[in-house]
């Protein structure tokens, strides 16, 4: 493990030399080098504080006391873990089939079937049925349908109600199983439900569920849950499952401790309350800013889709790449959806700071684009400056500074 801190340019040089180009870093023009974190705040090598709206890998031995995050930030030490490969092995063994269907954006905002469609759930699920039919015509057999319960990298897409039930019917009729990926959305992030798939209703239960990231609160862990029938079929095929760290007592103790904290600190309830407040604030911005095409989400899983034209839905891709001291990533097929999935300790004050900052940035961009100037936005908190507490309970002033590069948040101690 690195015992001395490297300067930012040296870290970038080493990463470029030793890490493949497909492992991208966030904020590519000027990557953020994070050296430590606490709660919902991350700190760079200069001590500047960033409000984290990205990580569902919590910031939480020498390295664990400082930081754990994902590989898209600069850091002098790197790590990774997955569960979907095991889920697919289970499906292949249980069904005896090989073909796998993955989800392609059942998006009711800009997809093929939109909110004005009389039954988008059936229309999108019929696309899956057609894929199955084409596979059968070519001699294929469906082993599984695998999808995030709510699409994250696809642009914070919320599937229409009833979609998964209808897809499951087609897939199971073809002899396959349904796998839902809860890595991004599980463990209470939805607020109203502990698991994302539960939003579809009590009549939908997947055959296999994968989870990871939040389960270890910074400790690399993943987990696969399935039915006894599927698990027994895996063993009956003469296959043992073993990996060196699978089921180790340290990781299991950490996972149990995380579940205890989620319950004892009411983090699911916090996601419900703060998420609702955040979505209200963001929707109030939509009324004032023409760049905001859609605001969607559940709990602390929120997407803000930026468009240049609300009728044509022209993606505002470049505008979504603005880089601030609030860490928000852009995703979706056009990379124009601001993705907010912050740590579950996110507060009402953090939500208000995000909305205030986004208002300032949008107003500046819209002015540069000669879009209709918004009237003055009145946010629920009614402030453009505030005091917030840092990790030690110290209060700091947060204000927006304008310069030729745009609006930047600066955090400093009083």
Image (cartoon, grey):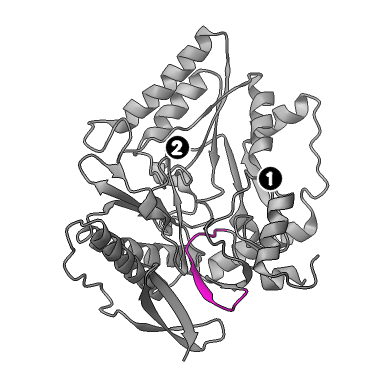
Q: Quadrant of residue 332?
A: top left
CB-based contact (under 8 Å), mark 2 and mark 1: no
Magenta highlight on residue 16 = no
Task: Tell me if residue 303 can be seen.
Answer: no
Q: Secondary structure at mark 2?
A: loop
Q: Quadrant of the N terminus?
A: bottom right
Query: Marks 2 and 1, Cα distance to the nearest angstrom?
Result: 40 Å
Question: Where residue 20 is drawn, which disc sits there?
Answer: 1
Q: Is residue 294 above or below residue 409?
A: above
Q: Tell me what residue is drawn at x 41 percent, y 72 percent.
A: 408
**Taking 214 as reference, is 149 left or right?**
left
**Residue at the extreme front:** 404
The residue shown at (44%, 32%) is 104
Whole-percent x, y for residue 196 in the image: 46, 48
Residue at horizontal 79%, vertical 67%?
Answer: 2
- In the picture shown, does residue 57 fall above or below 140? below
Above or below, 282 relative to 5: above
Q: The magenta stretch spans which residues?
A: 45-56
Q: Estimate the x, y position of residue 389 in percent, counting from the top left.
A: 47, 84
Q: Nearer the viewer, residue 374 or 158?
A: 374
Q: Residue furthest bottom?
A: 414
Viewer-proximal residue, 347 or 332? Answer: 332
Relative image position of residue 93 (x, y in whole percent): 69, 25
Mark 2 surroundings: few (<14), some (14-19) or many (≥20) residues within 10 A: some
Give the residue at mark 2.
204
**Mark 2 vs 1, N-terminal side:** 1
Q: Is residue 63 left or right of residue 52?
A: right
By secondary structure, the bulk of the magenta-drawn segment is best described as loop
**Among the 4 quarters of the image, the one containing residue 7:** bottom right
């Amino acid at each position: 493990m690195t015992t001395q801190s490297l300067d930012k340019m040296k870290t970038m040089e080493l990463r470029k030399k030793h890490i493949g180009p497909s492992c991208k870093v966030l904020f590519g023009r000027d990557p953020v080098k994070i050296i430590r974190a606490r709660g919902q705040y991350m700190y760079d090598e200069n001590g500047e504080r960033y409000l984290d709206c990205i990580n569902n890998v919590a910031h939480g031995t020498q390295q664990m006391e400082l930081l754990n995050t994902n590989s898209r930030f600069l850091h002098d030490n790197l790590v990774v873990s997955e569960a979907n490969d095991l889920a697919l092995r289970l499906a292949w063994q249980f069904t005896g089939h090989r073909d796998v269907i993955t989800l392609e954006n059942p998006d009711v905002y800009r997809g093929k079937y939109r909110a004005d469609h009389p039954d988008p759930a059936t229309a999108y699920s019929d696309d899956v049925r057609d894929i199955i039919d084409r596979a059968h015509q070519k001699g294929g057999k469906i082993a599984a349908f695998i999808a995030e319960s709510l699409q994250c990298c696809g642009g914070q897409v919320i599937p229409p109600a009833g979609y998964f039930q209808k897809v499951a019917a087609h897939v199971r009729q073809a002899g396959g199983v349904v796998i839902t990926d809860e890595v991004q959305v599980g463990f209470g992030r939805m607020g109203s439900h502990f698991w994302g798939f539960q939003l579809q209703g009590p009549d939908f239960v997947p055959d296999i569920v994968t989870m990871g990231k939040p389960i270890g609160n910074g400790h690399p862990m993943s987990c696969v849950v399935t039915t006894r029938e599927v698990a027994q079929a895996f063993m009956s095929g003469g296959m043992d499952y073993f990996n060196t760290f699978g089921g180790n007592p340290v990781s299991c103790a950490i996972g149990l401790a995380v579940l205890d904290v989620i319950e004892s600190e009411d983090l699911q309830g916090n996601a419900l309350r703060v998420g609702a407040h955040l979505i209200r604030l963001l929707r109030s911005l939509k009324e004032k800013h023409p760049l905001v095409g859609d605001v969607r989400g559940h709990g602390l899983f929120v997407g803000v889709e930026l468009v240049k034209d609300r009728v044509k839905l022209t993606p505002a891709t470049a505008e979504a790449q603005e880089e601030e001291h609030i860490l928000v990533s852009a995703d979706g097929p056009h990379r124009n959806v601001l993705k907010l999935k912050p740590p579950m300790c996110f507060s009402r004050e953090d939500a208000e700071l995000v909305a205030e900052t986004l208002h300032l940035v949008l107003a500046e961009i819209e002015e540069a684009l000669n879009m209709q100037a918004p009237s003055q936005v009145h946010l629920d908190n009614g402030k453009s400056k505030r005091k917030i507490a840092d990790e030690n309970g110290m209060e700091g002033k947060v204000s927006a500074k304008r310069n030729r590069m745009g609006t930047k948040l600066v955090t400093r101690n009083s």
